[in-house]
Amino acid sequence: MGANHDDHHHAPAHHGRALRLGVGGPVGSGKTALVAALCRTLGGSLRLGVVTNDIYTTEDADFLRRAGVLDQERILAVETGCCPHTAIRDDIAANLDAVETLEDRFGPLDLVIVESGGDNLTATFSRGLADRQIFVLDVSGGDKVPRKGGPGVTSADLLVINKIDLAPLVDADLDVMARDAAAVRGDRPVLFTSIRQDPSASAVAAWVSEQALSWPHEPVSAA
Amino acid sequence: MAVNPALLLLTDSRLPAGGHAHSGGTEQAIATGTVHDLASLAAFLRGRLHTSGHVAAALAAAACALGEESSRTGACAQPWPEALGASRAEALGTSPTRSEALGALWILLDAEADARTASPAQRAASRTQGRLLLRVARRLWPSPTLDDLTAGPDLRCPGALDDLALAVPNPHHPIALGAAAHAAGASPEDAALAAAYHAITGPATAAVRLLGLDPVAVHGLLADLTPDLATTASDATPYSRPWAELPARSAPALDLLAERHAGAKVRLFVS
């Protein structure tokens, strides 16, 4: 067993493949808008691929293709059979297959983003699929959500709280959200954004870029 | 017959090989109104088992038997013409190596599955599931030889899963299932039973999700079909080469549902 087992065929070592970034969160929190923003901001400096997990259709993939943020062929849609969380956690086969298809076709890549279908607070990515994960909440879901916790909120490498421009309209207290998030997340970062006001999602993009560039693989400049 | 524990793993819906996202035509059968309640689901499942399920069971058994045959052969690098019929051996030249001969056989068996799958959408779904299962199975049951380089030359042959992957990277699902069953230590009849079971459990679960049927009632339908599972598995095991004799029961409605599903705008399941 040992080394052979871990490095068997389709489970490549970390070196030599792209960083895999999971983006999860409830329906409507802005996952697809964030992925589009990341593609727009990082597409010039990183070699990208995107896998979407739409619940019903290829709507998210179509949105990204229409947005023109990435070559259409670099966006793959995976159906999840009514269970978006299964496809990112319990049975990641179809998503891994899509990620590897992108790497085979367009590789070497620096970053492959896997966007989960909208789900509930228990959704979290398997470490077998995502090396890093972002959980996206929005303020209109209520400022109590970070306090409720759940694996997405507590364990994601980055928690993004989106639509802060709506906070006054929905009586959401950002300080409460920041404090509650810190209480369950310890030192792990939280970023407040409004992708509507900042279409480049600059702070999140900077975090993602740092993760991708520190990922032990062939550096971008060598391409 | 004692239950092979590996068979439980292979048939468990929690096996992380992508099966959860396939409904085997159930989603379209529901969309078209064909399946709308317990009784219509029962008929659908029974029909599925005795048509495509029966064929899948026979193919899986044949694949498992080919895996067994490959494990019994001698040194890997030696010519191995006797494993092939004379005509196949001629096609490959006078003395094919073991890997050439086995590769040709896996390709041939996979082609038999192709010939029995009329719908292009169904072929694609079967090959996707086969590829994912093959990938999972190679990690679960890696060739022992990879970890034991001190083995003698006779034991350094690739396992059946590696032979299959080299010859057919995207095999049909029943072929991958049969090879996986062999790698896990199961028999051809076990493989057939797993394929038959797979033919109805995924579709039944899809109906629970899509129609909101009582899950216990749906499992009752599956329990009613268990005698049919047993007969399907035992009927599926007598076939050996020439594989042209393998059953070719068709289900035109399933073919049409698969094609319709592939073109559907709204789709929760891959197939």
Image (cartoon, helix red, strand yellow):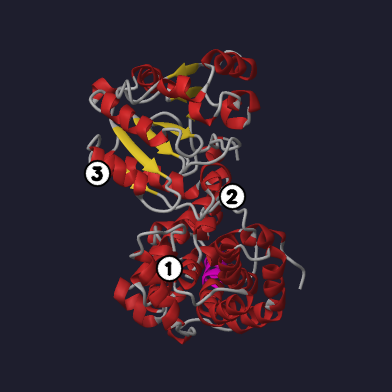
Which residue, given by chain and number where applicable, does mark 3 sit on? A72
Between circles 2 and 1, the one closer to the viewer is 2
**Chain identifier of the residue bearing label 3 in the image:** A
**Chain identifier of the residue bearing label 1 in the image:** B
- First reached walking from the N terminus: tag 2 or tag 1: 1
Q: Is residue B18 above or below residue A3?
A: below
Could you tell me the amino acid type at mark 2? Answer: Leu
Residue A51, horizontal then vertical, whole percent: 38, 42
Q: Tell me the SS state at disc 1.
A: helix
Residue B96 in sight? no
Q: Residue at x 71, y 78 (%)?
A: B224
Q: What secondary structure is the stretch in magenta mostly built from?
A: helix
Residue B113 position by quadrant: bottom left
Which residue, given by chain and number where applicable, does mark 2 sit on? B140
* Magenta span includes B69: yes
Q: Disc 3 vs disc 2: Cβ atoms closer than 8 Å? A: no
* Magenta span includes A121: no
Q: Residue at x 45, y 37 (%)?
A: A28
In this view of the protein, which residue sits in the foreground, A157 or A178? A178
Residue A181 position by quadrant: top right
Residue B27, horizontal then vertical, whole percent: 48, 66
Q: Which residues are magenta?
A: B63-73
Q: Classify 10 Å Cα crowding around label 3: few (below 14), some (14-19), many (20 and above).
A: some
Residue A23, horizontal then vertical, whole percent: 45, 33
Q: Are marks 2 and 1 on the same chain?
A: yes
Which residue, given by chain and number where applicable, does mark 1 sit on? B106
Residue B122, horizontal then vertical, whole percent: 40, 69
Q: Are marks 3 and 2 on the same chain?
A: no
Mark 3 to mark 2 CA distance (whole Å): 35 Å
